[in-house]
Amino acid sequence: MTAAWMLYGAYGFTGKLIAREAVRRGHRPVLAGREAARLAPLAEDLGLPHVVVGLDDDRALERAVADVPLVLHAAGPFSRTSGPMLGACLARGAHYLDITGEIPVFANTFRHGPRAEEKGVALISGVGFDVVPTDCLARFVADAAPGATRLDLAVAAIGRPSAGTARTAVEILARGGLVRRGGSLVPFPLGEGARTFRFPHRELWAMPFPWADLETAAHTTGIPDITVYLAYPPKKIAGIRRTARWAQAALSIPPVRRAAEALAGRASRGPDPEMQRTGRSYVWARAEGPGGAKEAWLETGEGYRFTAEASVRIVEKVLEAPPRGALTPAMAFGADLVLEVPDTRRYEVLPEG
């Protein structure tokens, strides 16, 4: 049995999955969040302790994390919620993990790396899907192609987004498209640059998307030119290309963005239990440089199920042998970390059929 730790945002869609996976693996995390009416019934159902605390009271938050060695933060959108929790963890010397996929959050996490090293704690953002699979596969192909200067990643996630993921997607779209060139993030029109990729299950169209790996893979591999693609139906890609500019302009207006986030949240319920059980997700990566290229694929379980399974295992690893500083999952635990998650396969050559 590992030491008790805190799961913040426990009553959200993904938080509940993580809480149940933690109990299944023998943990008794402290469940935390700001809404007692949603938190208490979950804690009672799982027989776990709980604490009600908001993210807008720094002193109360520090008191809440004072007695735990680690916090797994699962309350998004993380661009608004990560900073206070990360600050409380640093103040109290607790390890900080989260399940974000937002570029600004990773950038902020890495800014606090020196202080984390001084405090002897780990800061690891992105301990779920898609960052763990993509980060691990990026490191795998980069290690096999020394001196690589270009990295391309593509993700095909099958399933419906949760309310939290949908709200986060609105924030990402409001910032517009990005790629990494010469080590820096540069704007790239959403909907442009689409192409086909051969995934383990079939060929799909995908478009460049401002996914978290534009930040994480840069830290993990040091490769200066990175493009991340998201699988999308061709007709929807064409629609995004036509409307991206005005949509981004509209979402730059705070009331419009808040309304869009609320609408997206109400319309998104996440995958049902059957989809979680049977769904599959896929990642492709290619690193290329003067010395040659390396290509590989990953096949994993459904993304939300993967997040629950991966995040709890990473909690265990951090508590057992804590790394120090701000790290990506693959920086902390290597390219094979993803293979420890059930129902995950890595291919260097795709199987026939």
Image (spheres, grey):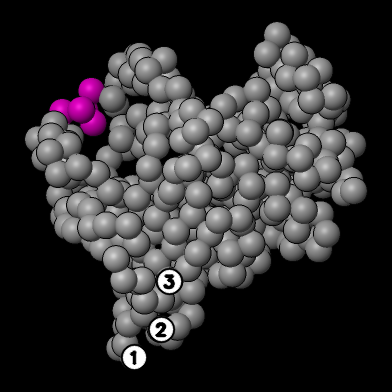
Q: Nearer the viewer, residue 60 or 152?
A: 152
Confirm whether residue 157 shows in the render: yes
Q: Say if residue 81 shows up in the picture.
A: no
Q: Residue at left 71%, top 34%?
A: 20
Q: What number is the disc on residue 291? A: 1
Q: Which mark is residue 243?
A: none
Residue 193 is covered by the magenta coloring: no
The CA span between labels 2 and 3 is: 16 Å
| Above/below status of 246 relative to 287 | above
Name the residue that disc number 2 marks.
145
| Residue type marked 1 | Gly
Q: Residue at x 47, y 68 (%)?
A: 346
Q: On the picture, is 235 further left or further right than 167?
A: left
Quarter of the image for residue 12 reads: top right
According to the image, label 3 marks what residue? Answer: 347
Which residues, given as a range, are shown in magenta? 245-250
Cβ–Cβ under 8 Å for marks 2 and 1: yes
Q: Amino acid at mark 2?
A: Ala
- Reply above or below: 7 against 336: above
Q: Residue at x 31, y 71 (%)?
A: 352
Q: Are marks 3 and 1 in contact (CB under 8 Å)?
A: no
Q: Is residue 115 left or right of residue 227?
A: right
The amino acid sitting under disc 3 is Tyr
Tell me whether circle 2 and circle 3 mark residues in contact (CB < 8 Å): no
